[in-house]
Image (cartoon, rainbow, N blue to C red):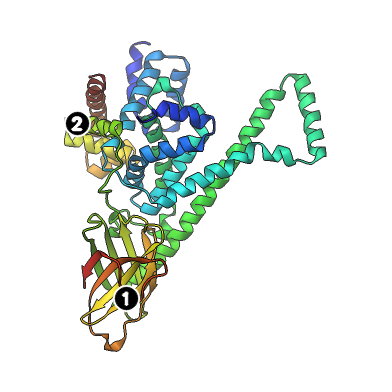
Amino acid sequence: MDVGDGRLLTRIVARDPEALATLYDRYRGVVMAFALRVLRDRAEAEEAVVDVFHQVWRQAEAFDAGRGTVGAWIMTLCRSRAVDRLRARQRRDVVLTHDADDPLSRIASTDPRPDEHAELSLKKKKVVAALAVLSAGQREAIELAYYDGLSHTEIASRLGEPLGTVKTRIRQGMIALRESLGARTEA
Amino acid sequence: MNGRCEQFDELLTLRVLGSLTEDEAARLDEHLQSGCPRCAAELAATSEALGLLPFALPEVRPSEMAKARLMARVRGEAPRTSSPRATAAWWQVAAATLVAAALGALGGGFSVGRKSEALVAALHARLDEQSAELATLRRQVFQARDAVRMASAPGVRVVELAGQQPMPGASARVFWDPSSDTWQLYAANLPPPPAGKTYQLWLITGTQKISAGTFGEGAASAGQIRVPADAGTVIAAAITDEPEGGSPQPTGSILLLGKL
């Protein structure tokens, strides 16, 4: 059977590159999907994926099992790396005129054969089900904040909604998401 | 843990999303550092819930190069902690020993050593990041320049290639500029060619299959092709897998195909 994430992390702390390789193979599909969703550029998303796992290698000691799962920790690292890159790119956009809706960026589509890993596909099902509980508006607002790194004010102007409405949606969406995830993970 | 705690809920979400203003961050930190268990737990739960969101995305596989780069970086680093010490000149060792002894006498040796080690590690990490970023930027500038030139040149033909039986999920877009005899290709979901094989792009006329050259992995490739005047009209483009170095005429299976 598979070695658990926690064990892999222990081996990574002990400087075992094979453990990092195993963890990489396990999460690469999700991390890449995440980075690509944020950055919408395949080359840059791959750079971010490498950075994320390099950070896992360097900071494995900092992971605190009491505060959450390894998967969520990796996603937290990924989000900050990807959003940092996104913001850096927005700052230099003047030069490159990179368009996030560039069809060339978008032809990098999804993997038809996702990595097989029983625990992950179970997790995937749970999250998809939990997201289905949210209203379209709540989901949209949360995704704009999470994936596009927008502040509440930026989301409000993007959606043409009052700031208060956006705040309420995110807040209620988060409550619903957590309830739904909590109910499902404990079940 | 008091009634005021709920006012921090919004800030906790913003903290996880990384969009706190400085004032808000200071306010929240002050509260968290006061040791409020309720808000610490809330922060962890919010972070965990948001950290699960990406699992709902359809997975995308990075290229094999990404893993190779990661492992090279990691393996290249392993000796870093020990080798500078091993190769240090005697006077460096002596000086370090003296300094350490002096600091040790002051009771601060350990933490200073740890701090400078952490600083060196942080600087290394930063350097790595910046070199990587520079390389990405450089590549993007070239790609963007070429892409703009290609997409805006008059007479450029665009071909959409769809994955065939062996890899139905693959797709590619080829820009072919007959006036400069150049092409560019942007591929998606095209796995790296198997060992000993390469991909080869062909332009197909009613009578001929003309090689446009080979390419390996990576989302973007470019090359040159000259279609002879007597070859007839180009009606399609195809990608096959061929032995390394390519073939004069296609021998492998047609992996992607598109009509002009």
Residue B78 lies left or right of residue A96; in this view the side is right
Of the pair B109 and B61, the residue shown nearer to us: B61
Q: Is residue B237 above or below residue A97?
A: below
Hey, what amino acid is under mark 2? Answer: Ala
Q: Quadrant of residue A78?
A: top left
Query: Where B155 sits versus B8, above or below?
Result: below
Disc 2 secondary structure class: helix
Q: Position of residue B235 (x, y in %)?
A: 21, 76
Kindly report which numbered mark, 2 or 1, lies closer to the viewer in this rendering: 1
Q: Measured along the vertical axis of the image, is residue A105 above or below residue A13?
A: below
The Cα atoms of the two marked residues, 2 and 1, are separated by 51 Å
Left or right placement of residue B168 versus residue B214 in this view:
left
Image quarter (top left, top right, bottom left or bottom right) of the C terminus of chain B: bottom left
How far across and down, in percent of the image, does residue B193 sit? 36, 58
Q: Is residue A153 above or below residue A1?
A: below
Locate residue A119, reporting x and y percent. Answer: 30, 30
Residue denoted by label 2: A129
The answer to whether tags 2 and 1 share a subunit is no
Q: Which residue is mark 1?
A: B249
- Residue at 22 percent across and 82 percent down: it is B207
Residue drawn at point x = 26 percent, y = 57 percent: B170
Three-letter residue code for mark 1: Gln
Observer able to see residue B111: yes
Q: Position of residue B74 (x, y in %)?
A: 53, 42
- Work out whether residue B21 or residue B157 is closer to the camera in this orientation and state it: B157
Q: Nearer the viewer, residue A79 or B176?
A: B176
Answer few, some or many: residues within 10 Å of disc 1's Cα (few below 14, many 20 plus, some between 14 and 19).
Answer: few
Which quadrant is the N terminus of chain B positioned in?
top left
The residue furthest top is: B2
Chain of the residue on which disc 2 is drawn: A
